[in-house]
Image: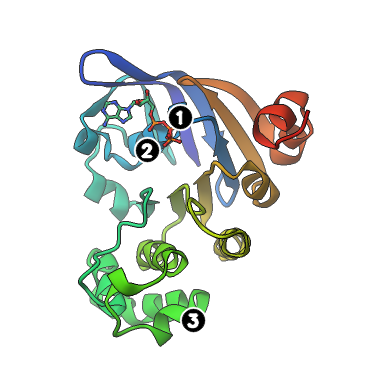
Amino acid sequence: MLRIDDLSVRYGRSVKALRGVSFEVPDGSVTAVLGSNGAGKSTLLRAISGTLGLHGGAVIGGRVELDGTRIDTMNPAAIVRLRLVQVPEGRQVFARMSVEENLRAGALSVAPKDRDAARERVLSLFPILGERSGQAAGLLSGGEQQMLAIGRAMMTSPTMLLLDEPSLGLAPQLVTRIGSIVREIHAQGTAVVLVEQNATMALAVADRAVVLEVGELALEGPADELAATEDVQRLYLGGH
Ligand code: ATP
């Protein structure tokens, strides 16, 4: 279980991006993180994956624990070894490398004897990556690049996957596909923390949800209960 406890984060000297955020992500759950632009969603994922420092940010209060181990003081590689992996926003695939090379790059922390099995699992989740294995990743469509970014993270067989806006910029049909991929990943036993602007998709696949508003936790609860609240309907689901 992932526990976020009274977490505060700052960038540089002035920007306080998270203030006293607390919630838990149970093993094997899908938790949606909703909030408007600048609410602190990406910051939250960076604080969990240990990558805040790469963006000039720092945890200034509280803690993050995975199965009782404090991880906000660990470096990103150590956190990946605990099988907690983030897919950053913007499909950051290695554009000049082939699909196959991108997948292999995702498996560098995996014991060599386990790499083939991991690759088979990823290709059964994303058959398109097998069909495109020799192609330069930069030549894939937006949706395929997103699948490659998720597939590369799945090479580590994570117990927890952090997804930052996987549906951003994708056509509706592909948003639906991303939603079913999240369901499949969840069904294979991986917990998912899903940051999404597309609240309709996120709340449909999640069992729990949290809403951030200007760096603070505004709402938290079962996804279906949150989806039924007036605030979430009005602010995130386009209701009135
Ligand atoms: P979006 O949906 O636009 O990605 P978000 O909810 O993910 O928004 P964050 O990107 O976490 O929000 O940003 C939270 C706050 O921190 C914002 O005020 C943002 O301007 C600021 N911020 C984010 N990254 C940095 C950074 N690298 N340096 C300084 N400030 C930052």
Determine the residue located farthest toward the top in the rendered image: 14
Disc 3 and disc 1: Cα gap in Å? 35 Å
> Is there a contact, CB below 8 Å, between mark 2 and mark 3?
no
Looking at the picture, does residue 57 appear above or below residue 16?
below
Element carrying mark 1: strand
- Residue 234 bears which disc, if any? none
Amino acid at the residue labelled 3: Pro
Q: Residue 113: give x, y in percent of width and height.
A: 28, 79
Which residue is at 35% across, 66% downward?
152
Quadrant where ligand 1 appears? top left
Can you tell which quarter of the image residue 135 is in?
Answer: bottom left
Which residue is at 63% across, 28% downward?
220
Query: Which residue in the protein does label 2 denote?
Result: 48
Amino acid at the residue labelled 1: Ile
Query: Which residue in the protein does label 3 denote?
Result: 127
Q: Is residue 69 visible?
A: no
Element carrying mark 3: helix
Of the image marks 2 and 1, the number of the one nearer the N terminus? 1
Which residue is at 21% across, 34% downward?
53
- Residue 4 bears which disc, if any? 1
2 vs 198, left or right, is left
